[in-house]
Amino acid sequence: MQNHLMQLTDKLLARKRAIVETIIDQLKNISQIVREACRRQTL
């Protein structure tokens, strides 16, 4: 039973990590778009 619970917790942690990584990627994309827009305005 212990082995099954560890596998379940690993799956849950992997899912949470995937969500966090997706959010971080989206924030990086948004910041890149904002940075590009600011550069265009100053040129």
Image (tube, rainbow, N blue to C red):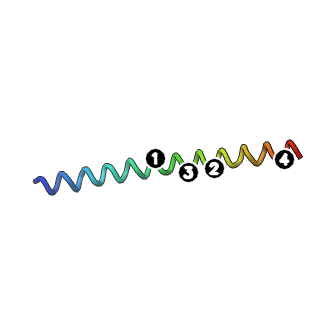
- Between the residue at mark 1 and the residue at mark 2, the CA separation in whole angstroms equals 14 Å
Query: Tag 1, which secondary structure?
Result: helix
Which residue type carries mark 1? Val
Kindly report the distance in space between the C-alpha atoms of the residues bearing marks 4 and 3: 23 Å
Could you tell me the amino acid type at mark 4?
A: Arg
Give the residue at mark 2: 29
Q: Which residue is mark 3?
A: 25
Residue drawn at 73 percent across, 45 percent down: 35
Q: Which residue is mark 1?
A: 20
The numbered mark, 1 or 4, whose residue comes first in the sequence reads: 1
Residue under the point 86% across and 43% down: 42
Quadrant housing residue 31: top right
Q: CA distance from mark 2 to mark 3?
A: 6 Å
- Are discs 1 and 2 less than 8 Å apart at CB? no
Residue type, mark 3 in image: Asp
Residue 5: where, in percent of width, then height? 18, 51
Q: How busy is the neighbourhood of tag 4: few (under 14 within 10 Å), some, or many (20 plus)?
A: few
Q: Which residue is mark 4?
A: 40
Do tag 2 and tag 3 residues touch (Cβ < 8 Å)?
yes
Callout 4 touching callout 3 (CB < 8 Å)? no
Say whether disc 3 or disc 1 marks the residue closer to the N-terminus: 1
The residue lying furthest to the right in this view is 43
For marks 4 and 3 on the same chain, the one whose residue lies earlier in the sequence: 3
Q: Please, what secondary structure does the residue beneath circle 4 have?
A: helix
Q: CA gap, disc 2 to disc 4? A: 17 Å
Q: Which mark is residue 37?
A: none
